[in-house]
Amino acid sequence: MKSRKPSIPYIIWMVVFTMIPIVMIGCTAFTDKNGNFSLDAFSNALFYSEVFLKSLWIAFLSTVICLVLAYPLAYMLTKMKQSSQNTMIMLFMIPMWMNFLLRIYAWIMILQENGPLDNFLAILGIPHSSYLGNTAAVVLGMVYEYLPFMILPIYTVMSKIDGGLIEAARDLGSGNVTVFKKVIFPLSIPGVISGITMVFVPSASTFLVSQYLGGTDDIMIGDVIDKVFWTDQNTGSAISLILMVFILIFLIIMNLFGDEEAIA
Amino acid sequence: MNRIKRKNGVASKIYIALIMIFLYAPIAVLIIYSFNKGKTTVWKGFSLKWYEALFRDDNIMNALANTLIIAVLASIFATILGTMAAVGISNFRGKKRMIIQNVSNIPIISPDIVMGVSLMLLFSFLGVIFGFEMGFFTVLISHICFCVPFVVLNVMPRITKMDRSIYDAALDLGCNQWQAFYKVVIHELMPGIVSGLLMSFTYSLDDFIISYFTRGAKFQNLSIEIYSMTHRRISPKINALSALLFLAVLVIMIIINLRDRHEEKVRSART
């Protein structure tokens, strides 16, 4: 119990299966097919910069929508009875445990021509058409995939807010709005930060969602990595490396935010 | 506490209900169409034929078996490795500990696709040297990779919170180190170990991206089977499969919830 030895197998494991693969990505990105040093992979990767921006845009939209939907919801949850809070959280988690592909597949069914949405709108007199193949459908899919990841951290942080603080604010003459602005909102920031991270990172980097729900110009960076990697590992690695560096920078910025808020 | 709690109004109840509908409507659609006689989203009458077709489909049944075997093995192995790691890491201090924990978190924060691609590079490289092909074992190893960090994260707080003198007491009472660990310490860590195990199991079941890159040419699990089915043509067999998976998830969730409630009762009875 006081020995460090039990962690040795895992440390070796991490070196072999976490560190070395990342080093290999770096090496592959900076070499050409023959293994010589080269920056060609990066100049090839530049070709996809528009796709990269589009991915960030879709991820940004999805994150904002998730935040707007989840924040009030988390707040409402904290006002329920403890036992119903637990049940509600369970209900929000169940869809998340369905297979990722099945959840997208469900939206293909709903949005396709002659699907439930189309049939419903046809009753209202709107002509039949498919609602797949556009950016909105991709964002919808992303929000559906990752909304619980925004709800859970915000809820967790909010439910831990000391009731005494709210009581004190009330005793000092604060109304509901002031209590929210001066107590609940600032204390919920760490939850918001981790929610943003948990939604933005996977939605910027996932693949298939845009292939299934989006149109031809909704291709995202994950789809590009998938396509390119099988034929050109060097360019694939370069794109992966850029994606990873970008996400690392994003995480560092988010961390700075979190710390500053904690100090203030 | 109750005095400051203000109940939710009608507006917020409607809001919660709308979010619930948003989350569950797609699943309901999947399940409803699994009973459809027709092959498209046009309703042709009630039928169980897609369930029958599902159970007759050897590919799917085989893939399901693979998924379950991988999930069971990966979660057990990850739990053992992760629990040992957490015990060991808790004895590191300062910078060393920070470095180990940060490296351990890499699989959690790095995008799945990057992890999948990097493991594929490693396995194809090792495959050339040692002469093996990617398949069952490379998928298993990859799943263990992304499961262990969750076990460490779940067990670590239990170790920090644990009263270390109970371990010393066990030693004083004549246990050797190993006995003290499995007779005493492990009971204190159990809730963290179980959550780590369950998380590992569900993440392994749900994974598609990492299996996709590390599976080689032949290995099929459920996610990959679903992927190739949805790529070919939509088949209501997938709907039948979804309905059954949903049922399984529901049962698991209810069991976990009951376990948590039981634990809470035990805890409140103790104090």
Image (cartoon, grey):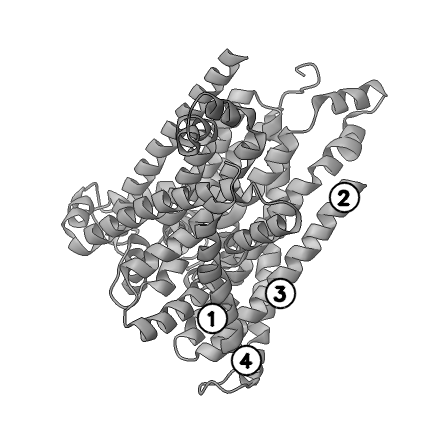
Q: Nearer the viewer, residue A54 or B70?
A: B70
Q: Earlier in the sequence, mark 3 or mark 2?
A: 3
Q: Which residue is mark 2?
A: A261
Amino acid at circle 1 = Ile
User: In this picture, is A131 found above or below A167?
Assistant: below
Amino acid at circle 2 = Glu
Q: Nearer the viewer, residue B268 or B175?
A: B175
Q: Are marks 1 and 2 on the same chain?
A: yes
Amino acid at circle 4 = Phe
Q: Nearer the viewer, mark 1 or mark 4?
A: 4
**How far apart are the two marked residues, 4 and 3, measured between alpha carbons?**
17 Å
Q: Are marks 1 and 4 on the same chain?
A: yes
Q: Which residue is mark 3?
A: A246
Q: Earlier in the sequence, mark 2 or mark 4?
A: 4
Q: Earlier in the sequence, mark 1 or mark 4?
A: 4
Q: Which residue is mark 1?
A: A225
Q: Earlier in the sequence, mark 4 or mark 3?
A: 4
